[in-house]
């Protein structure tokens, strides 16, 4: 069958031009039907691949990922090594990755119409880079080299998408198991790039098993590639013991419409928050309110004189004198001429920075400040400002502050008595290695405060919640999550959602004892080491390929 497919593909550009004989009309019609059938099979394979890739982000299991690339690998095998065939493969792969993006992140449209297109463009480009390098090498060099390059190249491009200026690491393959935390407990050793590695290896083994489908050995090897890591994960899951030390934690969900939030007076919003604060049990030692819950714009030099903060401090003194309140706020800092930062803006003769901030306050006032430092591209920052300053008018308001925001260079860990808390603001919780900086700084639990209502009731806010389950596993820290419009809730260090949650467009308070841990996992200590290693392996593969092609051109190798 495979030789027949390659024969059809190879003849696609030669009908009517064969040397030595004329092609009959019947042969032409037969070939046309055959080629149409092959095109249809390729199209169906693209649809199947996109559906299998998207499942984990649409609330379903991520396990279909272990065979999601097999249809694309089959399409790649069906093509030859000509330039025309290369572009044919390019088109099918591009369509598959665009469909995957469109099915999963279309909800970005609600916040900014350019969002899903920009994210799809960059994500698809990186996926295409890895896959088309594999396709190219597979036609001109050894299969082992092509397979190694696919694995290393895909992980490396995902890593670049995580650490680069253009960063929206939503559709990393390892994130697809956010609803299957029982299967990826070993993320505490590898992070999500271990999940990507698992997916790619399984796909290659299943593809090889399909090519040798009469070989039991190939099918057993592919099955073991799925079963063994899952069994190891289940063993870790079963043996894990929750720490005994706990802190009573409350998360508040005010349910304020994002598109009204920054266009109305803050007074009623403060009253809403204060009424919810009154519902928090007196036993709570840690209270969380969502990102930009305080919207009026607070001067950080005068926080002690803020009337709105004074209201919260008085409420804490009356009902929660020993509690720490972590609340999101829109703040700014003014600089003297010459002392401004690279992100500072100039207006009315004043240099200042705007921040998306988490404030830690108790009955005695503000205790600590953390500035959100992983910013959303095109929303809170413009990448490569030296190149894209002329596009700054496209930056929109998704967190109460517009334009390039200020950032911190170090992570700030909040302290509630002897308990240390990681205050991750919204998008920061997507980055495993970044959250690890808080944990290495002593954080015993992860507190996520966020405002996910910009995407309405689409899959994106549920995906964001599920990603926190992966952070819990990676660092073996419990997570308490306060979201403006949902989802708020608690996650233990095994990635399980504990107790009830507050879903979309619900208002209320949840309280639960949250376990504390001082353990440092392998991933916490070393971060995205698999991504860093993959870059070097990818480079070595490319250098080997170039050397191989040079030697072959000079007839030094077969």
Image (spheres, rainbow, N blue to C red):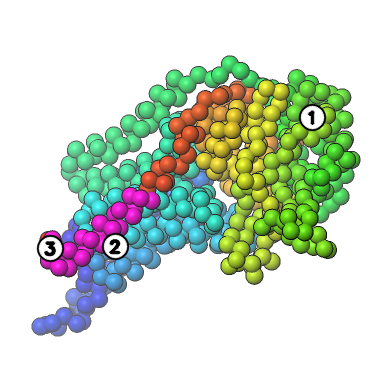
Q: Residues within 10 Å of mark 2 (few under 14, many from 20)?
A: some
* Residue shown at the point (66%, 65%) measured from the top left: 392
Residue 178 location (% of width, % of height): 50, 38
Tell me where residue 396 sits by quadrant.
bottom right
According to the picture, the residue beneath numbered tag 3 turns out to be 556
According to the picture, the residue beneath numbered tag 1 turns out to be 362
Tell me where residue 195 sits by quadrant.
top left
- The Cα atoms of the two marked residues, 2 and 1, are separated by 60 Å
Q: Tell which residue pokes out farthest to the top in this image.
A: 244
- In front: 20, or 169? 169
- In front: 266, or 97? 266
Q: Tell which residue pokes out farthest to the left in this image.
A: 20
According to the picture, the residue beneath numbered tag 2 turns out to be 136
- The Cα atoms of the two marked residues, 3 and 1, are separated by 74 Å
Horizontal side, residue 513 vs residue 353: left or right: left
**Does dot 1 land on a helix, a strand or a loop?**
strand
């Amino acid at each position: 069958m495979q030789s027949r497919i390659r024969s059809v593909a190879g003849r696609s550009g030669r009908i009517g031009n064969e040397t030595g004989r004329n092609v009959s009309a019947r042969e032409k019609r037969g070939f046309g039907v055959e080629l149409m059938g092959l095109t249809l099979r390729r199209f169906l394979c693209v649809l199947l691949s996109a559906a299998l890739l998207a499942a984990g982000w649409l609330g379903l299991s991520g396990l279909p990922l272990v065979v999601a690339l097999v249809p694309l690998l089959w399409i790649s095998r069906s093509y030859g090594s000509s330039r025309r065939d290369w572009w044919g493969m390019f088109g099918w792969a591009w369509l598959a990755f665009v469909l995957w993006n469109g099915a999963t992140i279309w909800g970005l449209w609600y916040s900014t119409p350019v969002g899903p297109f920009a994210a799809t463009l960059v994500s698809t480009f990186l996926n295409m880079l890895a896959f088309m390098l594999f396709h190219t090498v597979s036609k001109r060099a050894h299969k082992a080299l092509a397979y190694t390059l696919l694995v290393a190249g895909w992980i490396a491009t995902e890593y670049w998408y995580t650490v680069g200026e253009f960063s929206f690491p939503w559709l990393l393959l390892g994130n697809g198991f956010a609803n299957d935390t029982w299967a990826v407990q070993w993320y505490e050793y590898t992070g999500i790039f271990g999940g990507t590695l698992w997916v790619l290896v399984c796909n290659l083994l299943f593809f090889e098993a399909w090519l040798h489908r009469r070989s039991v050995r190939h099918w057993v090897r592919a099955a073991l590639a799925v079963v063994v890591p899952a069994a190891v994960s289940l063993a870790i899951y079963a043996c894990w013991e929750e720490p005994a030390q706990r802190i009573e934690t409350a998360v508040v969900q005010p349910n304020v419409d994002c598109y009204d939030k920054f266009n109305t007076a803050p007074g009623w919003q403060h009253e809403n928050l204060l009424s919810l604060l009154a519902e928090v049990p007196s036993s709570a030692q840690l209270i969380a309110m969502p990102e930009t819950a305080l919207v009026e714009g607070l001067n950080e030099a005068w926080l002690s004189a803020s009337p709105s903060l004074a209201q919260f401090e008085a409420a804490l003194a009356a009902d929660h004198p020993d509690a720490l309140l972590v609340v999101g706020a829109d703040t700014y800092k003014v600089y003297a001429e010459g002392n401004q930062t690279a992100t500072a803006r100039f207006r009315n003769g004043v240099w200042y920075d705007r921040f998306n901030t988490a404030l830690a306050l108790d009955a005695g006032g503000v205790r600590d400040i953390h500035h959100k430092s992983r910013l959303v591209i095109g929303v809170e920052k413009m990448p490569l400002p030296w190149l894209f300053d002329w596009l700054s008018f496209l930056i929109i308001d998704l967190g109460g502050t517009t334009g390039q925001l200020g950032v911190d260079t170090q992570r700030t860990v909040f302290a509630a008595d002897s308990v240390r808390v990681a205050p991750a603001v919204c998008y920061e919780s997507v980055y495993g290695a970044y959250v690890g900086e808080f944990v290495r700084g002593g954080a015993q639990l992860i507190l996520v405060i966020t405002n996910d209502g910009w995407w309405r009731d689409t899959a994106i806010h549920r995906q964001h919640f599920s990603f926190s389950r992966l952070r819990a596993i990676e660092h073996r820290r419990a997570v308490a999550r306060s979201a403006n419009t949902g989802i708020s809730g608690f996650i233990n260090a095994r990635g399980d959602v504990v107790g009830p949650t507050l879903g979309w467009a619900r208002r209320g308070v949840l309280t639960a004892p949250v376990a504390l841990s001082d353990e440092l996992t392998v991933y916490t200590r070393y971060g995205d080491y698999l991504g860093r290693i993959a870059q070097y392996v990818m480079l070595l593969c490319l250098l080997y390929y170039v050397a191989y092609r040079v030697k072959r051109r000079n007839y030094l190798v077969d």
